[in-house]
Amino acid sequence: MLYSDRSRKSPRIAYVDQQRRVEGQHRGAAIDNNDIVGSASYNIFVGIAVASIFGAGFFFDIFWPERRESKSVRLECKSCAVVVTIMALSDALAFTIIVATRSASITGVDANVAKEP
C-alpha cells in the first residue's frame, strides 16, 4: 500500500511520510517503524558503496581501456567485491526478516483510531 501509491518514492521515504502524517493528524500518536526505515537506509548505503567502488573502475575502463592494473589493485577490487556482496546479502536478509516478521505499531491512541486507514 505504501509503495504503490507513491510510485516514485523509495520505501524509506514512504514510511517516513506515513509516520509524519499519522503523528501530525493525531496528537500524542507515535508510530514505530524505525527498523524498516533503518534497513531501507542501509540499502541506500550499500547501493552507494557499490556505485562508488565499481563506478570509478568502470569509467577508468571507458577512458583508458589499454591500462594495466597492478596485482594490488586487482586484489583490492576482489576484496571490495566480497565485502559489498556480504553487505548486500546482509541487507537483503535483514530487510526480508523485518518485513516478514514485524509490522509498524501505533501507540498513544486507542485501537479504533490506530486501525483507521
Image: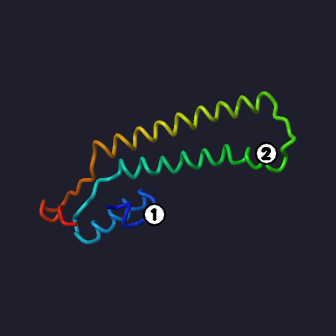
- In primary-sequence order, the first of circles 2 and 1 is 1
Residue found at x 59% / y 49%: 48
Mark 2 vs mark 1: give the one in front: 2
Instruction: Name the kind of residue labelled 1 in the image.
Output: Lys
Q: Residues within 10 Å of mark 1 (few under 14, many from 20)?
A: few
> Going by the image, does 19 lie left or right of 63?
left
Residue contact at pointers 2 and 1, CB within 8 angstroms: no
Q: How are the residues colored? A: rainbow
Q: Secondary structure at mark 1?
A: loop
On the rendered image, what quadrant is the N terminus found in?
bottom left
Position of 22 with respect to 11 (left or right) is left
Quarter that holds the C terminus: bottom left
Quick check: 29 above or below 39? below
Identified at 27% across, 50% down, the residue is 103
Note whether 78 is above or below 8 in the view shown: above
Q: Which residue is mark 2?
A: 61
> Label 2, label 1: how many angstroms apart (C-alpha)?
33 Å
Report x, y in % for residue 14: 39, 62
Horizontal side, residue 92 vs residue 80: left or right: left
Q: Amino acid at mark 2?
A: Asp
**Which element is circle 2 on?**
helix
**Image location of residue 102, percent across then percent down:** 28, 45
Q: Which residue is at 12% across, 63% downward?
A: 112
Q: Say if 3 sits above or below 66 in the image.
A: below
Q: Position of residue 42 (x, y in %)?
A: 48, 47
- Which quadrant of the structure image shows residue 85? top right
Q: Which residue is mark 1?
A: 9
**Residue at the spot 44% in from the left edge and 50% down from the top edge:** 40
How many numbered circles does the render carry? 2
Disc 2 crowd rating (10 Å Cα; few below 14, some 14-19, many 20+) is few
